[in-house]
Image (cartoon, rainbow, N blue to C red):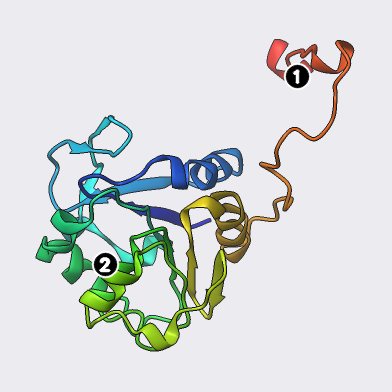
Amino acid sequence: MKKAAIMIFPQFCMQEISCLTEIFKWYDKEITVFASSLSPVNSEDGFKILPHKTFSDFNRDEYDCIITPGIWDFREALNDDKNIEFLKQFSDDKKIVIASISSSPILLGKAGLLKNHKFCCGLFEEDIDKYSFIPRENIIRKPVCEDKNLITAIGFAFREFAVMVARKVGIDCDENIFAPVAREYSEEELIFHMPHEVIN
């Protein structure tokens, strides 16, 4: 199984990709966290994350997907040329899955990846109008959109995004894997034991 590349930048949102990375963990899909430098990156959630590698260390033969989380304030990430140059290399790549949620499609737009794809995003209309590299005519008003090798989602559809991306890279997970609690549970149902093989 190939690895997943997670791209991070200042003010990125861990929550919007945590369901997806948890699925990767359950199915033994290795992730590598990439950034423009090896300096700690502040997430919008208040965590400092140390990237594993920089973009210059990326070997595309090892990965089958690039994940870009949402961004609380995208201006710093958008103005970092290293982010855009890294993404540009995938503009004509039809094999690697590009998965982008919430506001991060703005980075794909600046890198030219949205020109030939339908997509959705969690951007304000005023930002869409402001940046001419966002092809408004390609926007789909849905929570999640899959077009060829590109998967995009609005931030509230993080569960659906996780399932769609996981399935796209060959993980056969249930579509209700992160569904809300929908019924009452008995006490017996909420008692858990270690698997037999773990105990022994």
Q: Is residue 67 left or right of residue 42?
A: right
Percent of width and height locating residue 46: 28, 30
Give 197 or 38, whichever is nearer the viewer. Answer: 38
Label 1: how many residues lie within 10 Å, few (<14), some (14-19) or many (20+)? few
Q: Amino acid at mark 2?
A: Leu
Q: Secondary structure at mark 2?
A: helix
Q: Residue at x 55, y 73 (%)?
A: 146
Q: Residue furthest front?
A: 126
Give 89 or 130, whichever is nearer the viewer. Answer: 130
Which badge, 1 or 2, is on the more N-terminal residue?
A: 2
Q: Is residue 186 above or below residue 25?
A: above
Q: Is residue 21 left or right of residue 59?
A: right
Any part of residue 129 in sight: yes
Q: Which mark is residue 107?
A: 2
Q: Residue at x 41, y 61 (%)?
A: 122
Q: Is residue 25 left or right of residue 108?
A: right
Q: Quadrant of the C terminus?
A: top right
Q: Tell me the quarter of the picture where residue 80 sits.
A: bottom left
Percent of width and height locating residue 142: 57, 70
Q: Is residue 102 above or below residue 53?
A: below
Q: Secondary structure at mark 1?
A: loop
Q: Is residue 73 left or right of residue 121?
A: left
Give 136 or 97, whichever is nearer the viewer. Answer: 136
Label 2: how many residues lie within 10 Å, few (<14), some (14-19) or many (20+)? many
Give 178 or 29, whichever is nearer the viewer. Answer: 178
Q: Amino acid at mark 1?
A: Pro
Percent of width and height locating residue 22: 54, 39
